[in-house]
Amino acid sequence: MIKYDLIPQQLMHHGIAGQEQFFLPQRMESEALLLTHDAEYVKEVLELRLPAKAMRKIGFPLSAGLVERECVITQGTYQCARYALEEGAAANVAGGTHHAYKNRGEGFCIFNDFAVAANLLLKERAVKQILVVDLDVHQGNGSAALFEGRPEVFTFSMHGKDNYPLHKEQSDLDVPMETGTTDNEYLTTLREQLPYLYEKVKPQLVFYVSGVDVLAGDKLGKLALSAEACRERDHTVARFFAQKGVPLVAAMGGGYSPEISAIVDAHCATFEEIQSAYFE
């Protein structure tokens, strides 16, 4: 998607980030993918043998370039987590592939980058308790299923009630929002949930899916947030966890507004708010 190229360009153009603050990840090794995903599924993906029916659920045509991108995105999120544990926060210009399950992908997601990164960190004993804060307009169904019954990873999804997926999985905490929800109700609800989540989980690391498909007019979203409220959402999340001293990893998630500039501006605001909260 073109937004992945435009986000870093705009961040540098506006002085939000310099070239030295970016890194280019390699691809995630298959052994790490197997901590989260079924061996046969991983093999079919890497060997470009996924059936056409499976690819229709994912929504992309199968290609070597697509698989390479997914492996690089996943490695990028893991490396962001490592940087966050050292420096306080980091963000992936892509990622947030929360619809991927153990043995299948869907909704533009093949591998679940947050799940792979979380499982690898837990194996390495880098952290013991992780919180996933998923504010994409679509429920993080794959993440919810992957971490069901796993108390070391708490999944929170605040999403559009009537949005994809039709069948919602059960996160540790789901907060469905009515179609057409606007700024004040959304932000009030979020501010009510964050203290509860912190006290409930006491996370050592937060993974944040900052999808901008919550914006009014988004082609695949049904909420009605203004650009200002979307930025305030990111400000609220980043400031809250920065003040608690909890490292944060963000991934961009979805964004399907008719104008690409609206998508890129909203994603760049996420970076700006994280930078302000953690590094100023």
Image (cartoon, helix red, strand yellow):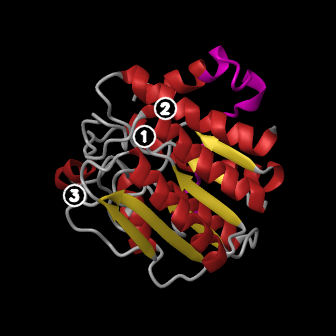
Between 237 and 106, the one nearer to me in the picture: 237
Q: In percent of the image, x 62 and y 68: which residue is there?
A: 195
Which residue is painted at 65% across and 33% down in the image? 272
Stretch of the chain drawn in magenta: 11-33
Occupied quadrant, residue 18: top right
Dot 3 or dot 2: first in sequence order is 3
Q: Mark 1 highlights which residue?
A: 212
- Mark 2 element type: helix
Q: Is residue 38 something one can see in this rendering?
A: no
Residue at the extreme left of the image, as rendered: 53
In the picture, residue 145 is in which quadrant?
A: bottom left
Q: Quadrant of residue 197?
A: bottom right
Is residue 245 inside the magenta stretch? Answer: no
Amino acid of disc 3: Asp
Please give the residue where the numbered disc 2 appears in the rendered image: 266
Count of labels shown?
Answer: 3
Q: Does 280 sit left or right of 118 as displayed?
A: right
Question: Residue 117: x percent and y percent?
Answer: 60, 60
Q: Which residue is mark 3?
A: 162
Q: Residues within 10 Å of mark 3 (few under 14, many from 20)?
A: some
- On whether residue 12 falls in the magenta region, the answer is yes
For the point 78% across and 26% down, which residue is it?
20
Quadrant of image for the N terminus: top left
Q: Are circles 2 and 1 on residues that touch, CB within 8 Å? A: yes
